């Protein structure tokens, strides 16, 4: 596992926010995944994209290839994911993503995942135990504040200390409780899904 130690977290740290578009559950197909590059929480630098299968197994490989193949890759310092489940239950193995990209990974969710419900839902899919292992491997979500003490989200981290991860979340959450790169990635991915 690659662990990044930040001596100083610069206001213009380049972060990548990754989110998926809307999809119809239990219907085979592909879903757009959008990566948005921001410098801190104010400067929009670029977009990258890929697609993954609904309830598939390709999220980790597709997202890591999208990142390492991007012209922005060498400037990136942190990857932020909107949770670890994309396109239904196409699980991102955050430890494998950290190793493949050599970048810290922070997952962000507005609400704490209900692991009992997730485990139950996984029973309806092939390779449910492998999916469940990837979810458990990401670690327990931790409640942290972002813009202020009342603005709470849940995060999981790989390759970065929890203290540095929280500083990065605070620095980049300028217009809402979630980092700007994730907010904009969500907007773009949602818009593409309607085309």
Image (spheres, rainbow, N blue to C red):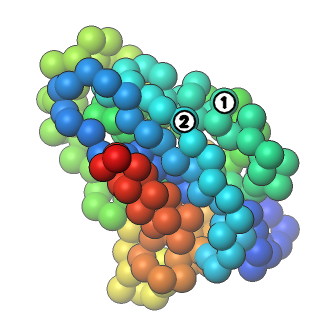
- Residue at which label 2 appears: 50
Whether pointer 2 and pointer 1 mark residues with C-beta atoms closer than 8 Å, the reply is yes
- Residue at which label 1 appears: 65
Provide residue 138's location: percent of width, then percent of height: 47, 39
**Quarter where residue 1 is shown:** top right
Q: Is residue 33 left or right of residue 77?
A: left
**Residue 142 is at least partly visible in this image:** no
Provide residue 109's location: percent of width, then percent of height: 37, 58
Q: Is 108 or 33 nearer to us in this picture?
A: 33
In this view, the residue farthest toward the front is 195
Q: Is residue 36 above or below residue 184?
A: above
**Residue 76 is at least partly visible in this image:** yes
**Quarter where residue 191 is shown:** bottom left
Q: Is residue 42 left or right of residue 26?
A: right
Q: Is 43 or 89 nearer to us in this picture?
A: 43
Label 2 vs label 1: CA separation? 9 Å
Provide residue 47's location: percent of width, then percent of height: 63, 54
- Graded by Cα atoms within 10 Å as few (under 14), some (14 to 19) or many (20 or more), the crowding at tag 2 reads some
Residue drawn at point x = 84 percent, y = 68 percent: 7
Q: Is residue 98 above or below residue 193?
A: above
Q: Which of the marked residues, 2 or 1, is nearer the chain's N terminus?
A: 2
Q: Is 35 or 101 nearer to us in this picture?
A: 35
Residue drawn at point x = 52 percent, y = 48 percent: 34
State the mark number for residue 163: none
Numbered disc in front, either 2 or 1:
2
Provide residue 15's location: percent of width, then percent of height: 67, 60
Residue drawn at point x = 48 percent, y = 83 percent: 175
């Amino acid at each position: 596992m690659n662990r990044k130690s930040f001596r100083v977290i610069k206001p213009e740290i380049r972060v990548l926010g990754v989110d998926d578009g809307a999809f119809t559950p239990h219907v085979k197909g592909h879903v757009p995944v959008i990566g948005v590059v921001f410098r801190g929480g104010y400067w929009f630098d670029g977009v990258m994209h890929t697609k993954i299968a609904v309830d598939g197994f390709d999220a980790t490989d597709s997202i890591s290839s999208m990142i390492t193949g991007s012209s922005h890759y060498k400037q990136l310092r942190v990857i932020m994911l909107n949770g670890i489940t994309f396109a239904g239950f196409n699980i991102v193995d955050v430890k494998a993503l950290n190793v493949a990209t050599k970048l810290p990974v922070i997952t962000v969710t507005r609400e704490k995942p209900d692991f009992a419900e997730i485990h139950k839902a996984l029973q309806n899919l092939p390779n449910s135990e492998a999916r469940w292992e990837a979810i458990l491997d990401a670690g327990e979500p931790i409640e942290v504040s972002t813009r202020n003490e009342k603005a709470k989200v849940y995060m999981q981290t790989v390759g970065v200390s929890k203290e540095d991860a929280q500083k990065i979340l605070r620095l980049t959450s300028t217009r809402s409780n979630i980092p700007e790169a994730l907010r904009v990635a969500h907007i773009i991915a949602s818009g593409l899904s309607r085309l």
